[in-house]
C-alpha cells in the first residue's frame, strides 16, 4: 500500500542536504509520495530504508507471466480499480476451455479453432490469450494425454486445471519449464 | 493469519423507484418492480445493501423498422403484432418490464397517427399485467399529444415514460408531473450533461425520486467501454454523495444490433443466430456490471441469459 509523505519521511536521512535537487527531506518525501521523484536521487538513504520504500511503491497486485515468447501473457500489475482513475496495463486474459473427457478428434478441432480465432479490428489484434485444459475425469493418464495434445497443437499459453495435485504433477512432467503454464 | 477485509462505506444511496401499480394501489399489474435503493457498487454485497436486483425489460415495437435477419427470425411470431409481442414478453420471454417504443409515430418513419398510438397503448396495457415503460418517438408535438391522451391510464398503472433530453425536456416533464409518472432522462455519454439534465428537471418541478437516467449504452465494439466508464463514474459520484446523480439508471442494449459484426455471416466468427444474441447480452451485462438498474433487450434469448446471470450475481458470497 502506498505510503504517505510523512511515512516516507520517517525513512529518509533528514540531512536536508539538497543533493537530490530538493531543499528539504520532507519536500523530497512529498515528491516521492506523488511519484514525481525517484529514490535513487538520494545518496544517503540506507539500504534498509530503500527496501522498505521499494516494497511500498510496488503495485499492490504483482505481475505474473504465463506462457512464453510472443504468446506470453502478463497478468496483474494494476494500480487502480477504475480505468478513469489512471489506466489499465494488462487486459484480462481470455482462455478457451478444453477438457480431458473430449475425444481426440473434438480436442483437436477445439484447438484448431482456438488457434484460428485471431483477427485485427480497428488496429487491435483480437485473439484468445490462453488455452485451459481441465481435468474432468480425475484420471492422471487422461489428463496427461489431453495436456500433451494441447502442447503439440497450440502455442498459446496454457492453464492446467485439476483439484488433485498428483494429476497435475504428472502432466507437468511435459509442460513445466518450456511452456511456463 | 486473519485478513482484514476492506469494507467501503459510502455516504450516498441510490433512489428507490417503483414501476407498476397492483390492485392494492389502484392498478391492474400483477406485480410492481422496484429498482434502486442500493448503497454500494453493483453486486458488492459485502460492502453494503443491494435491496433490489437489476431488472430486464423487453422491447415491443409499434411498427417494424429495418432489422437484421437474425433477430427478425427470432421474433418472427410477434414482429408487427405488438399486442401479441407484449403477451409473449410476459408468458414466454420472462420479461420483468415491457418497454413499448412508439417510434412509428415519428413523421420521418411510419408517421402513425396519435389516435392509433393511443389505441395501441390501451391494447398493450390490457394485454399484459407486467409493469410498463412507454417511449415516444422523439417528435415533441406528437409525443405530447400521445402522452396527454394516455395520461390517466399510464398514471393508474404507474408506468414510466421517456425520453427527456437536455434540449427537449419541458413538455415531457410537464406531462410526467401532471400525471405523476416516472420519467426517463437521456443524456449522450456525458456525466456532466446527465447531471445538468437532472438539475433542469428538478428545477422545473419533477420530483427527484421520479427520474431514471439513461446515460446511453454503446454496443459491443461501438463504444461499450466508453459507456461503461461514464456509467461507473455516475454511480461512484452518487455513492460519494452527489444528490443530482443518485437516480437509478436504465441502459438500452438493443443498440448492440446496429453492429454489423453482431449478425452478419462472417467466416471464423461463428453462427449469426448465436452471435447476435450474445452480442446484445454482452452489451447488456456490461451496463449491469457498471450500475444499470434496468436493461432493455430486443432478443428473448439474450434476455434469458442476462436474467440468469443477474440471478447468479445476486447470490451472496458462498452460496
Image (spheres, helix red, strand yellow):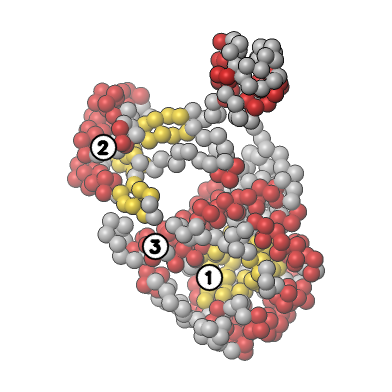
Horizontal arrangement in the rendering, residue B103 relative to residue B28 (left or right)? left
Q: Quadrant of residue B124?
A: bottom right
How many numbered tags mark residues here?
3
Q: Which residue is mark 2?
A: A155
Horizontal arrangement in the rendering, residue A157 relative to residue B16 (left or right)? left
Mark closer to the observer (1, 2): 2
Residue under the point 75% across and 62% down = B199
Q: Which residue is mark 1?
A: B59
Viewer-side residue, A86 vs B24: A86
Q: Quadrant of residue B153?
A: bottom right
Horizontal arrangement in the rendering, residue B258 relative to residue B99 (left or right)? left
Q: Quadrant of the C terminus of chain B?
A: top right
Q: Quadrant of the N terminus of chain B?
A: top right
Mark closer to the observer (3, 1): 3
Secondary structure under tag 2 reads loop
Position of residue B211 measured from the top left corner of the image (x, y, whole percent): 71, 64
Q: Which residue is mark 3?
A: B262
Q: Are the numbered discs 3 and 1 placed on the same chain, yes or no?
A: yes
Amino acid at each position: 500500500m502506498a505510503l504517505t509523505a510523512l511515512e516516507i519521511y520517517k525513512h529518509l536521512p533528514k540531512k536536508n542536504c539538497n543533493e537530490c535537487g530538493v531543499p528539504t527531506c520532507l519536500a523530497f518525501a512529498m515528491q516521492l509520495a506523488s511519484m514525481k521523484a525517484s529514490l535513487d536521487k538520494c545518496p544517503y538513504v540506507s539500504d534498509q530504508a530503500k527496501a522498505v520504500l521499494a516494497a511500498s511503491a510496488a503495485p499492490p497486485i504483482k505481475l505474473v507471466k504465463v506462457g512464453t515468447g510472443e504468446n506470453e501473457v502478463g497478468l496483474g500489475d494494476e494500480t487502480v480499480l477504475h480505468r478513469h482513475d489512471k489506466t489499465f496495463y494488462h487486459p484480462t486474459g481470455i482462455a478457451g476451455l478444453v477438457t480431458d473427457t473430449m475425444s481426440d478428434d473434438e480436442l483437436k478441432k477445439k484447438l484448431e479453432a482456438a488457434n484460428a480465432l485471431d483477427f485485427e479490428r480497428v488496429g487491435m489484434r483480437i485473439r484468445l490469450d490462453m488455452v485451459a485444459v481441465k481435468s474432468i475425469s480425475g484420471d492422471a493418464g487422461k489428463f496427461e494425454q489431453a495436456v500433451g495434445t494441447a502442447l503439440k497443437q497450440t502455442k498459446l499459453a496454457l492453464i492446467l486445471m485439476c483439484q488433485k495435485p498428483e494429476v497435475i504433477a504428472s502432466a507437468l512432467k511435459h509442460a513445466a519449464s518450456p511452456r511456463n503454464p | 493469519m486473519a485478513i482484514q477485509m476492506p469494507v467501503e462505506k459510502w455516504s450516498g444511496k441510490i433512489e428507490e423507484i417503483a414501476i407498476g401499480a397492483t390492485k392494492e394501489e389502484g392498478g391492474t399489474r400483477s406485480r410492481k418492480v422496484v429498482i434502486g435503493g442500493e448503497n454500494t457498487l453493483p453486486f458488492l454485497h459485502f460492502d453494503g445493501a443491494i435491496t433490489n436486483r437489476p431488472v430486464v425489460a423487453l422491447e415491443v415495437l409499434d411498427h417494424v423498422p429495418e432489422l437484421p435477419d437474425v433477430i427478425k427470425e427470432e421474433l418472427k411470431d410477434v414482429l408487427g403484432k405488438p399486442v401479441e409481442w407484449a403477451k409473449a414478453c410476459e408468458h414466454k420471454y420472462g420479461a420483468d418490464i415491457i418497454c413499448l417504443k412508439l417510434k412509428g409515430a415519428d413523421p420521418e418513419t411510419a408517421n402513425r397517427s396519435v389516435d392509433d398510438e393511443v389505441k395501441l397503448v390501451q391494447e398493450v396495457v390490457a394485454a399484459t399485467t407486467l409493469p410498463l415503460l412507454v417511449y415516444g418517438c422523439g417528435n415533441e408535438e406528437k409525443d405530447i399529444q400521445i402522452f396527454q391522451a394516455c395520461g390517466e391510464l399510464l398514471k393508474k398503472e404507474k408506468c414510466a415514460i421517456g425520453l427527456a433530453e437536455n434540449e427537449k425536456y419541458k413538455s415531457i416533464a410537464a406531462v410526467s408531473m401532471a400525471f405523476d409518472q416516472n420519467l426517463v432522462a437521456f443524456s449522450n455519454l456525458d456525466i456532466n450533461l446527465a447531471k445538468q439534465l437532472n438539475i433542469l428537471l428538478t428545477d422545473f418541478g419533477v420530483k427527484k425520486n421520479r427520474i431514471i437516467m439513461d446515460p446511453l449504452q454503446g454496443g459491443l465494439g461501438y463504444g461499450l467501454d466508453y459507456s461503461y466508464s461514464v456509467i461507473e463514474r455516475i454511480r461512484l459520484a452518487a455513492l460519494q454523495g452527489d444528490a443530482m446523480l443518485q437516480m437509478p439508471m436504465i441502459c438500452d442494449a438493443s443498440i448492440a444490433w446496429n453492429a454489423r459484426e453482431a449478425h452478419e455471416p462472417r467466416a471464423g466468427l461463428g453462427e449469426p443466430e448465436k452471435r447476435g444474441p450474445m452480442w446484445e447480452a454482452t452489451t447488456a451485462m456490461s451496463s449491469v456490471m457498471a450500475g444499470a438498474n434496468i436493461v432493455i433487450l430486443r432478443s428473448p434469448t439474450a434476455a434469458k441469459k442476462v436474467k440468469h446471470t443477474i440471478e447468479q450475481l445476486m447470490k451472496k458470497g458462498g452460496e
